[in-house]
Image (spheres, rainbow, N blue to C red):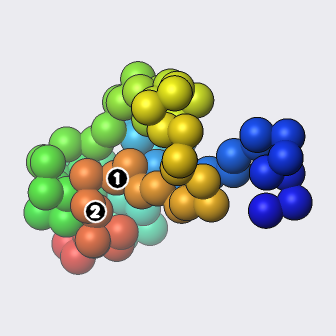
Amino acid sequence: MELRSHQVRANTICPEPINAARMDSMIAREAEQKGVSEEVISNGYAPGIPIGTFLEAHEIAHMALFLTSERAQYVSGQAISVDGNTFNPDPQV
């Protein structure tokens, strides 16, 4: 509200999970802690991701580009989840 006169909009992109090095290291760490293979952990996440796969970085970039476009001129003050509707952050294996 304070920056409205300067046409500043503020939004937050909440991504999860992304197919990248960070996710790979999280899966490796969890596999080691649980004494199972990384494949078991990775497959354990699949049921909790309705789209069935981790997101790619470019999919997050698409949202960022949208939010900076004229099409999003009335989008402000939002926390936008770009997560494929993930509901199972801790796979039960």
Task: Provide the residue designation for mark 2.
Answer: 86
Measuring from the top left, give residue 87's x and y in whole percent: 27, 71
Task: Provide the residue designation for mark 1.
Answer: 83
* Residue at the extreme bottom of the image, as rendered: 92
Residue 84 lies left or right of residue 47; in this view the side is: right
Which residue does the image show at 23% across and 76% down from the upper left?
92
Quarter occupied by the N terminus: bottom right
For label 1, the SS is: loop
Mark 1 surroundings: few (<14), some (14-19) or many (≥20) residues within 10 A: many
Mark 1 and mark 2 in contact (Cβ < 8 Å)? yes
* Residue 70 visible in the shown view: yes
Which residue does the image show at 34% across and 72% down from the upper left?
90
Which residue does the image show at 52% across and 27% down from the upper left?
70
* Residue 40 visible in the shown view: no
For label 2, the SS is: loop
Measuring from the top left, give residue 19's x and y in whole percent: 37, 35
Image height check: is 51 above or below 20? below
* Residue at the extreme front of the image, as rendered: 5
60 and 54: which one is in front?
A: 60
Residue 93 lies left or right of residue 76; in this view the side is: left
Which residue does the image show at 40% across and 41% down from the upper left?
18
Real-space Cα separation, disc 2 to disc 1, in angstroms: 6 Å
Q: Identify which amino acid the numbered label 2 is placed on.
A: Thr
